[in-house]
């Protein structure tokens, strides 16, 4: 197997745990003896063992006799060299006796960046870096945050065929059950869900990911000056929420950026949605469009039909979910 084939396999291992490793990046690792893969591991749960450690633990269970100096460890992300929720992976690799390490890409986190590689090479381990780097970077919004200095922001809206949102802030289902089920899986992908006060009051949303698999639930963030909310509302059902006051949406995003959050799903009304788009704080827009017309009594999502074009969005995909159309726009 080639380095590319082996690293793609390590990447596939990591993605099995994308819902439980977050907000950490997904990481996969394997050990190759030149003929076959002899051990595998992944970062399975936030706060638990890293991929390299799980892989080395699996190697320890291998019964056949192996010449450790002939083995190669493949890991999608640079091993850490610091103590956080777990110990430094570099120390475990050095202790294992493995003399060859192939790394998919450097960890962009300043705490790690380059330090793990330096530690390994200083102890005589052969290290090579840069295998399917782009594929690894697109697999986790962790990389986006460190490169762009803010979390990845996706806005999700439900709209009628004539682009309407609501009437007098009254709760009303616009889209089908199929679209609402799709939203649950979308929520599961994000580190937090951001909304505004009008949405919490009018819709009384739970804003959690109700999915048939294990997931680290996204943190719920309410953008509001009011601190005295009715804690009987669904939004406050547990302690996985935060109320943030800020003078602008830019300040709001920077306050979120200081936390261990790499991705934000916005589920809010037109005021907050438009403010974020106009401040260039939206990377992806997902529109679930019902094929019904609501009329002029309802509030429009955007000021005109060219709003998305004027703000640099292009349609990247669209497909049907039951009677609805799901459209995905990307910021160019």
Image (cartoon, grey):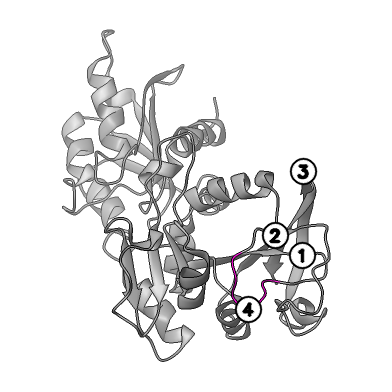
Counting residues from the start of the chain, the first of labels 2 and 3 encountered is 2
In the picture, which quadrant includes the C terminus? bottom right
Mark 1 crowdedness (10 Å alpha carbons): few <14, some 14-19, many ≥20: many
Q: State left or right for residue 332 relative to residue 143.
A: right
- The span shown in magenta is 165-171
Would you say 288 lies left or right of 210 here? right
Q: Residues within 10 Å of mark 3 (few under 14, many from 20)?
A: few
Residue 322: mark in rendering: 3
**Residue 91 in the image: above or below residue 190:** above
- Give the residue at x 28% y 40%: 50
Instruction: Name the residue located 18 percent from the left edge and 53 percent from the top edge.
Output: 84
Question: How many C-alpha atoms fall within 10 Å of the one at disc 4: few (<14), some, or many (≥20)?
Answer: few
Determine the secondary structure under disc 1: loop
Look at 26% across and 8% down and name the residue there.
63
Circle 2 residues within 10 Å: few <14, some 14–19, many ≥20? many
| Label 4 – label 2 distance at C-alpha | 15 Å
Question: Disc 2 designates what residue?
Answer: 174
Q: Does the magenta stretch include residue 196?
A: no
Query: Front-most of 287 and 93?
Result: 287
Q: Is residue 296 above or below residue 66?
A: below
Question: Considering the numbered disc 4 on the image, is that residue within a helix, a strand or a loop?
Answer: loop
Mark positioned earlier in the residue sequence (4 or 2): 4
From the viewer's side, name the closer residue of 142 and 303.
303
Q: Pinpoint residue 23: horizontal percent, then vertical percent.
A: 37, 54
Q: Mark 4 points at which residue?
A: 168
Disc with the residue nearer the chain's start (3 vs 1) = 1
Q: Nearer the viewer, mark 4 or mark 3?
A: 4
Q: Residue 160 carries which label?
A: 1
Marks 4 and 3, how far apart in space?
28 Å
């Amino acid at each position: 197997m080639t380095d590319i084939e082996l690293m793609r396999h390590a990447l596939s291992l990591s993605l099995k745990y994308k819902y439980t490793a977050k907000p950490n990046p997904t990481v996969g690792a394997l050990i190759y003896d030149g003929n076959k893969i002899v051990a595998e591991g992944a970062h399975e749960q936030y706060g638990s063992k890293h991929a390299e450690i799980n892989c080395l633990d699996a190697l320890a269970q291998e019964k056949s006799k192996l010449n450790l100096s002939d083995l190669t460890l493949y890991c999608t992300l640079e091993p850490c060299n610091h103590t956080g929720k777990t110990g430094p992976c570099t120390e475990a690799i050095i202790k294992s006796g493995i003399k060859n390490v192939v790394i998919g890409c450097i960890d962009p986190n300043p705490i790690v960046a380059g330090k793990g590689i330096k530690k390994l090479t200083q102890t005589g381990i052969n290290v090579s870096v840069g295998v399917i780097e782009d594929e690894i970077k697109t697999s986790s919004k962790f990389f986006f945050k460190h490169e762009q200095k803010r979390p990845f922001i996706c806005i999700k809206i439900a709209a009628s065929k004539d682009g309407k949102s609501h009437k007098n802030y009254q709760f009303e289902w616009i889209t089908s059950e199929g679209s609402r089920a799709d939203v649950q899986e979308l929520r599961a992908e994000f580190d937090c869900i951001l909304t505004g006060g009008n949405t919490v009051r009018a819709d009384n949303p739970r804003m959690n990911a109700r999915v048939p698999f294990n997931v680290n639930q996204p943190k719920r963030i309410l953008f509001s000056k009011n601190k005295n909310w009715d804690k009987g509302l669904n939004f406050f059902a547990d302690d996985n929420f935060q109320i943030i006051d800020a003078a602008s949406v830019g300040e709001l995003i920077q306050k979120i950026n200081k936390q261990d959050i790499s991705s934000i799903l916005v589920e809010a009304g037109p005021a907050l949605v438009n403010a974020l788009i106009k401040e260039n704080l939206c990377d992806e827009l997902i529109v679930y469009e019902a094929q019904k017309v609501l009329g002029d009594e309802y509030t429009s999502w955007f000021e005109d039909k060219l709003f998305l074009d004027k703000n640099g969005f292009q349609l990247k995909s669209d497909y049907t979910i039951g009677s609805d159309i799901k459209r995905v726009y990307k910021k160019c």
